[in-house]
């Protein structure tokens, strides 16, 4: 996918502005679908972090502080989470994994707002996690070529509804 970079040769500034606009509407939208704004911005950030260039990119730093934080607060904690289709929940989980990857890359830098996001993604009591806690992991019964996948934890069985 080709993206126009404006103002910063390494970061999709136009997409960042588009995400900011989407988040600040009365009826906000976080574009979580594949090749959507959030995924593209996360992947661009991960790429910059891997090359050690993220701290030199003001738009990337702004994404870390504002767009990333606002996006994940909305998709993990808002009441609207309960009304989204399973497919959207799957896309959110894929973006959660990208966020974890980004946070791992930045762990040594001790970026507090990224650590806050990591805690939020891993929080078992967020609306997103509670809603999806009864879902079976896609990896739970897989065996890989040379490595046996070990299940260390499984979600608790949902309580019967009264």
Image (cartoon, rainbow, N blue to C red):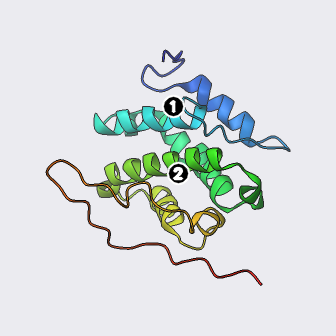
Disc assigned to residue 93: 2
Lower sequence index among marks 2 and 1: 1
Which of the pair 139/28 is nearer the observer? 139
**Residue 140 percent across, percent down from the top left:** 38, 61
Q: Residue at x 34, y 34 (%)?
A: 53
Please tell me how crowded label 2 is: few (under 14), some (14-19), or many (20+) other residues with Cα within 10 Å: some
**Residue 148 percent across, percent down from the top left:** 20, 59
Which of the pair 123/82 is nearer the observer? 82
Secondary structure under tag 1 reads helix
Secondary structure under tag 2 reads helix
- Tally the numbered discs: 2
Which residue extends farthest bottom? Answer: 162
Q: Residue at x 26, y 60 (%)?
A: 149
* Quadrant of res 62: top right
**In this figure, which residue is indicated by the disc labeled 1?**
40
Q: Residue at x 31, y 55 (%)?
A: 142
């Amino acid at each position: 996918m080709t993206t126009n970079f404006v103002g910063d040769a390494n970061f999709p500034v136009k997409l960042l502005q588009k995400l900011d606009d989407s988040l600040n509407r009365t009826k906000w939208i976080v574009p979580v679908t594949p090749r959507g704004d959030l995924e593209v911005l996360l992947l661009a950030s991960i790429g910059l972090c891997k090359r050690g260039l993220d701290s030199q990119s003001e738009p990337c730093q702004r994404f870390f502080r504002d767009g990333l934080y606002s996006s994940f607060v909305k998709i993990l904690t808002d009441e609207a989470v309960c009304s989204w289709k399973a497919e959207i929940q799957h896309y959110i989980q894929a973006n959660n994994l990208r966020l974890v990857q980004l946070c791992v890359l930045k762990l040594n830098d001790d970026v507090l707002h990224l650590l806050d996001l990591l805690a939020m993604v891993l929080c078992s009591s967020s609306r997103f996690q509670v809603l999806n806690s009864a879902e079976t992991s896609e990896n739970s019964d897989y065996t890989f070529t040379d490595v046996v996948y070990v299940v260390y934890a499984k979600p608790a069985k949902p309580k019967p509804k009264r």
